[in-house]
Image: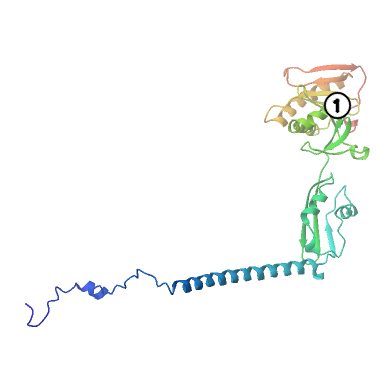
């Protein structure tokens, strides 16, 4: 019971509510109306703050841009980066003078003002250049690295052209460049243009058969004839004897050529002993138990060790 004159306050809150201040918490009333006199001023301050922030960002961006432009101008005009050396790797078909005249860069040019991609593209327009890499070597050196094509054969398209080991024809052959290389025939010029992949595959197949032919001492090959149906036929350079190997088995081309050339070696040895001259030897796999030989005439052939290899 409350004492006399005392006001009943009700039950005391629990201790954890007192600790959180829940019993004495004051709730700030949310104004339901905005003073019409202060609203325009606050809006102006908000717009001013936004404007100042945007202006500050624009100022920073402008300063950064100006700094970049200044740095770029300094790099591209400073004599500290003037080219004093152009380093090039030695190549078999391209002299240093030819490379320098093609890129058109003079000593004293600013190293950072050079367009390296343009220089590389200009170098790759030469048919002997398979790949070109150009890089800066600070502070004053330009380095040019050339990957040169290697001619593997000559392809007859009416006119003779050089081709690499991948079957890619890259330039017209001069008489000096064609010396010592076998001539591949049978690839139509139109086929190389219309069906490039198939034409290059035919060239690679002929080169693969020729590579296996050279694994043992055999006569020098002067012509490699490729045909989509008959396959590969090798013609020796001295007697012009044809050795038809046919088409290689998929996935085992080298093994196919070795098996068929082993049969050719046995027949060639027997023909030399009998002094018979073959014109065409067919070991194309159509009849694995026999070899077909077309004879040219009965003449004595020189021993294989005495032939040009």
Residue depicted at 52% across the width and 70% down the height: 47
Residue 309 in sight from this viewpoint: no
Q: Nearer the viewer, residue 103 or 253?
A: 103
Indicate the quadrant containing the C terminus: top left, top right, bottom left or bottom right. top right
Q: Which residue is mark 1?
A: 235
**Looking at this rendering, what residue extends furthest in the front direction?**
36
Tell me residue 293's x, y (percent): 82, 17
Q: Quadrant of residue 235?
A: top right
Q: Which residue extends farthest bottom?
A: 5
Q: Where is residue 113 drawn, in percent x and y?
A: 79, 62
The part of the image, by quadrant, that contains residue 55 is bottom right
Residue at x-position 82% and y-position 70%: 79
Colour theme: rainbow
Position above or below: 114 against 192: below
Residue closer to the observer: 175 or 107: 107
98 and 177: which one is in front?
98
Name the side, left or right, on which 51 lies relative to 280: left
Check the picture and name the quadrant holding the N terminus.
bottom left
Left or right, 62 with respect to 32, comes to right
Q: Position of residue 114 (x, y in %)?
A: 80, 60
Image-based side of 47 in relation to 188, left or right: left
Neighbour class for label 1 at 10 Å: few (<14), some, many (≥20)?
many
Counting every numbered tag in the picture gives 1
Q: Position of residue 38 (x, y in %)?
A: 44, 74
Determine if residue 143 is in view.
yes
In the rendered view, would you say 259 is above or below 133?
A: above
When asked about the image quadrant of residue 150, the answer is top right
**What element does badge 1 sit on?**
strand
């Amino acid at each position: 019971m409350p004492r006399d004159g005392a006001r009943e306050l009700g039950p005391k809150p629990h201790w954890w509510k007192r600790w959180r201040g829940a019993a004495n918490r004051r709730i700030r009333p949310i104004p339901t109306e905005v003073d019409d006199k202060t609203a325009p001023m606050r809006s102006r301050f908000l717009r001013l703050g936004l404007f100042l922030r945007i202006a500050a960002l624009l100022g920073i961006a402008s300063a950064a841009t100006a700094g970049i432009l200044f740095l770029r101008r300094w790099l591209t005009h400073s004599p500290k980066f003037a080219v004093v050396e152009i380093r090039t790797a030695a190549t078999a078909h391209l002299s240093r003078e030819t490379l320098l005249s093609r890129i058109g860069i003079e000593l004293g040019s600013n190293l950072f003002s050079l367009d390296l991609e343009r220089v590389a593209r200009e170098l790759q327009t030469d048919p002997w250049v398979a790949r070109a890499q150009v890089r800066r070597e600070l502070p004053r050196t330009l380095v040019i690295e050339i990957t040169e094509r290697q001619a593997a054969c000559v392809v007859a398209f009416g006119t003779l052209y050089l081709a690499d080991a991948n079957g890619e024809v890259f330039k017209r052959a001069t008489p000096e460049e064609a010396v010592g290389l076998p001539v591949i025939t049978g690839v139509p010029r139109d086929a190389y243009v219309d069906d490039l992949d198939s034409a290059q595959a035919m060239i690679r197949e002929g080169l693969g058969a020729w590579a296996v032919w050279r694994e043992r001492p055999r006569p020098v090959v002067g012509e490699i004839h490729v045909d989509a149906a008959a396959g590969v036929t090798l013609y020796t350079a001295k007697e012009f004897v044809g050795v038809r190997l046919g088409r290689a088995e998929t996935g085992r081309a080298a093994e196919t050529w070795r098996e068929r050339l082993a049969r050719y070696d046995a027949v060639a040895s027997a023909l030399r002993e009998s002094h018979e001259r073959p014109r065409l030897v067919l070991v194309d796999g159509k009849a694995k138990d026999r070899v077909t030989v077309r004879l040219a005439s009965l003449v004595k052939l020189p021993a294989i060790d005495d032939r040009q290899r």
